[in-house]
Every structure is written in C-alpha cells, then in structure tokens.
Amino acid sequence: MKKETIEFALRSTWQQITNMYNEKALKYGGTMTMAFTLLSIDAEGTPSTTLGPKMGMESTSLSRLLNTMEERELISRKPNPEDGRGVLIFLTKKGKQKRDLSKKIVLEFNSGLEKKIDKKKIENFYEVIEAIKNQIEEEQALNYF
C-alpha cells in the first residue's frame, strides 16, 4: 500500500468534513462557510477585517459572503465606534438562531468522535496539528528573509 502524505490526509479528510457540513447546512438553506461565519461573530460585534484572516478567506470572497448573509437577515453591519472607517458585524435574531443550530451540529459531531477515539489519541492529534502549524510558520519565515 502506498503511503500518503500528511498534506493529502489532511486535505482529503477536510474535504469530507466540508461535504458533510455542507449537506447538513443545505437542509437549513445555508452553507458550511455561512455556519462557520456565524460561529466566528462575537456578541459584542466582530470587525469585518478580522473575519477574513480568522476564516482563511480573501476579502472579496468574504465581502460576497457577508452581502449574502445580510440579504438573508443573518447579520447586520454597524459603524465601528473605535474606528470611523471600520464596520462591526453583528448577528441578527435569525442569525443567532442559525448560529445555535450550527454549534449544536458541530458539538454533536465532536461528541461522536470523542466517544469513538481515546482521549489520549485526541490529545496527540492536537499536538500533531500544533507541530504542523509550527512547521508552516518556520517555512514561511524562511521565505520572508
């Protein structure tokens, strides 16, 4: 059997997760990306400029997503009192309901994993993820100098 790379394992697993969550979100008229956005918005409002990096999205894609979410009355935008040029994103009542549903679905999936996977293995998984992130940062630092 051919050994796959870490990147391939991560990518293919992430694709399966994306497909699973998109199927679930579609039942409620949304997408996984919308659900992730709802989960990323704080109660006191989130600056739109921090959402892109938090979610790994380019500003044009994020802008389209936020426009769609605003049209669907999931979010509202208000001027940032601390930054006259900035905008804060808030969840509407409908957005909060969808966020709660998204959170429930994510927690159910995680709970199912925790029942099937030994706690030590999960801890090891997070250690490996941290090592991968550190390696990426080191590689990126090499490219900057």
Image: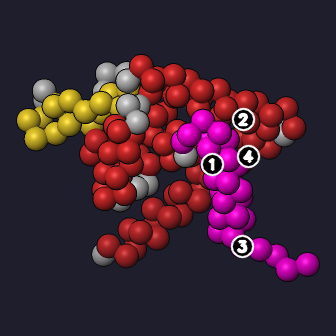
Pair 1/3: label in front:
1
Question: What's the distance in space between the residues labelled 2 and 3, CA to CA?
Answer: 25 Å
**Looking at the picture, does residue 5 appear above or below residue 11?**
below
Secondary structure of the residue carrying tag 2 is helix
Is mark 4 in CB contact (under 8 Å) with mark 2? Answer: no
**Magenta stretch bounds:** 1-30
Q: Is label 2 or label 3 in front? A: 2
Closer to the N terminus: mark 1 or mark 3? Answer: 3
Alpha-carbon neighbours of circle 2 within 10 Å: few (<14), some, or many (≥20)? few
- Label 2 with label 3: CB-CB less than 8 Å: no
Relative horizontal placement of residue 9, taking residue 91 as reference (left or right): right
Q: CA distance from mark 4 to mark 2?
A: 16 Å
State the residue in front, 26 or 61: 26
What residue lies at 69% left-to-right and 70% top-to-bottom? 8
| Mark 1 residue element | helix
Q: Nearer the viewer, mark 1 or mark 4?
A: 1
Q: Mark 2 = which residue?
A: 110
> Which residue occupies 65% across, 39% down?
27
Residue 107, percent from left and from top: 67, 30
**Does residue 134 sit above or below 49 in this rendering?**
below
Quadrant of the image occupied by residue 95: top left
Say which residue label 3 marks: 5
Along the horizontal axis of the image, is 90 left or right of 86? right
Write down the residue under mark 4.
124
Tell me the kind of residue under disc 2.
Asn
Badge 1 amino acid: Asn
